[in-house]
Amino acid sequence: MIKKKTAITALIFAVTINLFALDGREIMQKAEDSVKVDSTHALVQMSLTDKNNKESVRILEMFEAKDKNGLSQSLIIFHKPASVAGTRFLVQEQKGRSDDKFIYLPSLKRVRRIAASEGGQSFMGSDFSYDDMSTRDIDEDTHTLLREEKYNGQDCYVVQSIPKNLKEAQYQLRISWVRKDNFMPVRVELYETKDRLKKVLTIEKLEKIDGVWTPIITKMENITDKHSTTLTMQKVEYNKKLPDALFTQKFLETGRL
């Protein structure tokens, strides 16, 4: 009788676990929702390292907030070195189409729109592309939970994401390691084709700041070019009121509110 009860209990437990199991899309939605803030303002060090381990360092400032429709808008301003100082980059999320991207280069003294066809190009010589700096809607991809495993000692979901429209996608396949405890993606493999790895994004240091899980050190490694870019948060603050005028082409051109 005891054995029968144990077997029934195990069956009920197994069915319950299955009922509440997350699928790939739900995991990626939770990952997207894991950071709930009104705005972000950060000072960041960008380190570029080539195949000979030669490093060049840039200092930039990042702003992000939601517009009145709840869509994301972000601004990056380069401060150092002098060769890139004054460069400004604006991304405005759009519903149902590609985000609008604009860049101001001091040498040209004008704002230039980044065309959709340029999305795969390098952003300011880094290992991040213009599209990497933009948003991607959850339902642009089909997400499949591949397995569950540990990564750097943390229990993770491993999710495969394949674009529904392969012709318009920069990557043909992405595999993400998403921590179970906070739903932060801590490793993302980006494939040029389904069997050719192009880049690997890793969160090398993660801290909770003002109740928000924050990537302190993020590394993007280009496997093909043997080049990497590391972003290190030097200062970050959340939920501070940011002027709407920051996220405009006028500010992009003038640098003045």
Image (cartoon, grey):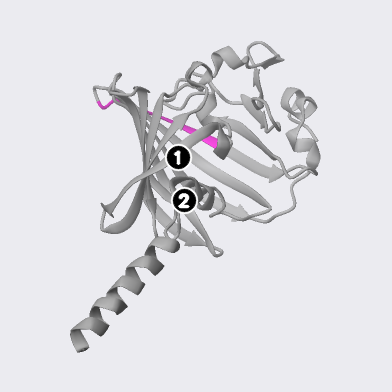
Mark 1 is surrounded, within 10 Å at the Cα level, by few (under 14), some (14 to 19) or many (20 or more) other residues, namely many
**Residue at (65% x, 37% y) in the render:** 74
Q: Would you say residue 87 sits in the magenta stretch?
A: no
Considering the numbered disc 1 on the image, is that residue within a helix, a strand or a loop?
Answer: strand
**Residue at (65% x, 42% y) in the render:** 64
Q: Quadrant of residue 16?
A: bottom left
Quarter of the rendering occupied by the C terminus = top right
Q: Assign the magenta stretch its main secondary structure.
A: strand
Farthest left residue in view: 3
Numbered circle sitting on residue 143: 1
Residue 72 percent across, percent down from the top left: 67, 40
Depth check: give the residue in front, 106 or 217: 217
**Residue at (55% x, 32% y) in the render:** 140
Q: Is residue 133 left or right of residue 252?
A: left
Q: Is residue 63 left or right of residue 180?
A: right
Given contact means CB atoms under 8 Å apart, are the residues at marks 1 and 2 in contact? yes
Residue 35 percent across, percent down from the top left: 56, 54
Q: CA distance from mark 1 to mark 2?
A: 9 Å
Residue 236 percent across, percent down from the top left: 56, 52
Residue at numbered disc 2: 27
Is any part of residue 52 visible from this angle?
A: yes
Instruction: Tell me the kind of residue under disc 2.
Output: Ile
Residue segment shown in magenta: 53-60
Nearest to N terminus: mark 1 or mark 2: 2
Q: How many marks?
A: 2
Q: Would you say residue 54 sits in the magenta stretch?
A: yes
- Figure check: 182 above or below 49: below
Is any part of residue 55 visible from this angle?
A: no
Considering the numbered disc 2 on the image, is that residue within a helix, a strand or a loop?
Answer: helix
Residue 50 percent across, percent down from the top left: 30, 23
Instruction: Tell me the kind of residue under disc 1.
Output: His
